[in-house]
Amino acid sequence: MLDIKDFSIFEDQVSFDFKGFLIKIGSYWKWFLLSLIITFTIAYQVNIRKSKVYSMETLISVKEESNPLFTSNTSLVFNWGGTSDQVQTISTTIQSRSHNELVVDKLQYYINYLVQGKYALEDAYGAVPFYVEIDKSKGQLSGSLIGITFVSENVYEIRIPFASQNVSLITYSDNSYSNTAVATVDFVKRYKVGERVSLPFLNWKLQINDNPGFYKGNEYFVSFSDFNGTVAGYKGINVRSDDKGGSIITLGMQGGNKARMVKYLNSTVEMLIKRQLDSKNQFATNTIAFIDSTLIAMESQLKETGNELKSFRKGKNIYDIEEGGAKFSDKMLEFDVKKDEVNRKITYYNTLKSYLKNSVDYSKLPAPSVAGIDDPNVVTNVSKLISLSGQRSEMAYAVKSDKIFKDFDNQMAAIKNVLLENIASAKSSLQYDLALVNNKISQTESTIKTLPDDQQELIKIKRKYDLSDNIYSTFLQKRSEADIVKAANLSDIHFIDPAKDVGGGQIGPRTSANYVLALFLGILFPLLFVFFIFFINNSIQNTDDIGKLTKIPLIGVVGLNKEISDLAVYDRPKSALSESFRAIRSSLQYLYKKQNVDGAKTLMITSSVSGEGKTFCSINIATVFALSGKKTVIIGLDLRKPKLFDEFNLSNEVGIVNYLIKQKSVDEIINHTQIPYLDVILSGPIPPNPSEMIMSDGMGELIEELKKTYDYIILDTPPVGLVSDALELSQYSDVTLYIVRQNFSKKEMITLLNNRVKRGELDNASIIFNGFENKAKYGAGYGYGYGYGYGYGPYSNGYTDEGKPRNFFDAISRKLGLKRKK
């Protein structure tokens, strides 16, 4: 069976220390505060510099308007289609390039009127006292500001700073660009209001608006933008239809100038109404054009036959001649009119058939009624074909989807096929009617041939004249009807609520959103920094880290020494730092007692690398023993990098090296210090072979000699992670203290310590956690007792000497118990 110990491996797995991470975040509160101050300052500056953004809307309806002049007696029949398709068509048209080109060109929105605001140039359309009339056929300065200052009410000054010898010009008649050479100076010239400005780079006439207000001495700016770029900006107009009422459309725009948006919204609807009405009148327009061309031909023919009839009547008794052939003339006129009607229908069908087979644009088709065709199938299908053709042409500028065009093409192809079948059927019937009429005409002509020659000639001439006159009168009537129908047509688009500036409408800048973003970024940036530091920092942060990495006992936590001198216990014996060393002394005495060590006791202090506080701990541990009346000696065995002499202001000329090479005796290398019962043996001159000297027999002899005199012998050794000297000295020590420094010692070094202890290279090892700062910055844990911290806040008053407060805030924080001495 598996034992529970088999699962102990999982206890050592590295896990995310969420609590430690939160504590570390709290320790960097100053960074968070600074970051928030910076981000909120940036947000504030952005908000005050951003231009105000407004939203304007206009409301229109799409309702099919029937012509009030359409009656059962009207010979012209038109079919306009329904409302359902128009809403989508209108929505697409409003956002199309072709439509917006017409509106931008009408309003000349490619001309920008600007004034200098507090932080930047601002759009002043509708607020400037003037406007410019440009010559579209000539080039205008592109991409540069043109300064205008009114010297008086009728005189203004143009100022243009030219930075290069060539400037770009735009010609709005064809939207083409060109270049012209200029002098690299500030161009300054004065003109009268209304005077034509004709320059190589500027061609306009400046006019004053009605009720301009006071403008003398004010400075304004004008610039010319790219036409296509301006159109592209207005194509983004927001179009949405009402869900409850499918024929209601709302047009909306957002921008910084309400006057400009109001004008554009109303103008785009007006342009839409005009285009829609023109499209709606296309039937009538095509019909009128067809009738006009026919009337011109018939007028010439009627004049010719009239002259012929007048010539025939000269010198003849016309009444006697007419009396004999009057009844035949009336009958022939009736048959000729019928034949002409049938022929016109056949001609229209032939033309329509050819048009359907050879053309792709059906918007120019005349109404079938001009030829007297009233077949509802033909009339309806021709109307649908014209409507679909017009919609497809408009969408070609705004829609790039091949699927939509295929749908249009499929619908038109289906209508064409139906029309071709209708044409074939109608022509068969008309051919039969034509044969009957021709037969009747032939019979009547046979009878007329029995009449005298004069009567036959008169009937022939009058027959042509009456036919032409009848056709001419019929077409005049149809043209009049078409004009009336066209004039009476109404657009299907109506204003419900035109755009108007009634105040308000501001939707931006969203200052609250910017401040929320500033709050988010102000927290995010330092959070990411702390997160990065937390994960790349592989140093020991707290006692929990030590407990997770090793089973070697931790016998003391020493605070961070912020004094200049390392003699912390001697200089401030009542400080919390001194108490931590006294706690270590108690723990060491327990260890010596546990190991039954009698007489003089040795203590070796080492660490992983230099800088972890070996010498500092050696001095102060020795000091607490000496202050308790025990004769103590510190031996500086870091022969490569001696430091001990600096702390006691001694000379390092004589030391243990001199003893090991037999130059000096024990008494000659011992130095007395200002601390009672504490002596120091320095390292002496740096030898070429420090390891060999430590391994010599003289080292053991020295230890034995010192044991006769001292109660405690402290060995201050070099780092065990760098050199092997400490391993050679471990044979002389009863207890080994391994120094680990907060936020300095690497976690990998604890693994190295574990291996050395496991191999028996270090005996009776214990750990001291040195340089401990506040738990908020490095993690939780004060340890196991009095020596594992810095005291007990306000409860330590009278027991420890924390020194005088450094400032007013330090004193307040101590009173409140919010701060411990580090």
Image (spheres, rainbow, N blue to C red):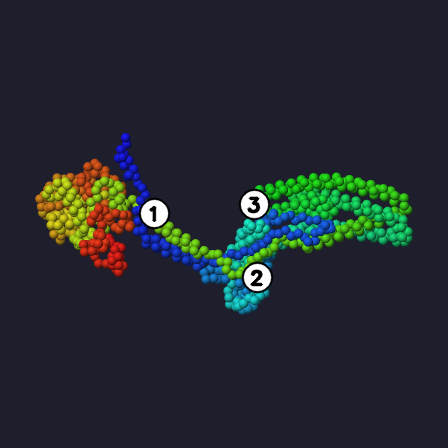
Separation of residues labelled 1 and 3 (CA atoms): 49 Å
Mark nearest the camera among 2 and 1 is 1
- Measuring from the top left, give residue 441's x and y in whole percent: 83, 43
Residue 133 point in image, percent of width and height: 58, 61
Displayed quadrant of residue 266 = bottom right
Q: Earlier in the sequence, mark 2 or mark 1?
A: 2
Spatial CA distance of label 2 from label 1 is: 60 Å
The numbered mark at residue 132 is 2
Q: Which mark is residue 78?
A: none
User: Mark 2 or 3 closer to N-term?
Assistant: 2
Residue at x 15%, y 48% (from the top left corner): 622
The answer to whether one can see residue 140 in this image is no
Tell me whether circle 2 and circle 1 mark residues in contact (CB < 8 Å): no
Of residues 571 and 139, the one drawn nearer to the viewer in this rendering: 571
Q: Nearer the viewer, mark 2 or mark 3?
A: 3
Residue annotated with mark 1: 531
Q: Which residue lies at the image location 53% right of the left edge and 63% below the top edge?
A: 127
- Sort mark 1 into few (<14), some (14-19) or many (20+) by Cα contacts within 10 Å: some
Secondary structure category for the residue under label 2: strand
Amino acid tagged 2: Val
Q: Between label 1 and label 3, give the one nearer the viewer.
A: 1
Above or below residue 63? Residue 147 is below
Q: Nearer the viewer, residue 117 or 432?
A: 432
Image quadrant where one finds the N terminus: top left
Density class for disc 3 (Cα within 10 Å; few <14, some 14-19, many ≥20) is few
Secondary element at image label 3? loop
Residue 493 x %, y %: 61, 53
Is residue 721 at least partly visible in the picture?
yes
Instruction: Give the label on residue 400, or none.
Output: 3
Q: Kindly indicate the quadrant of the structure image that contains residue 794.
A: bottom left
- As helix, strand or loop, the secondary structure at mark 1 comes to helix
Q: Amino acid at mark 1?
A: Phe
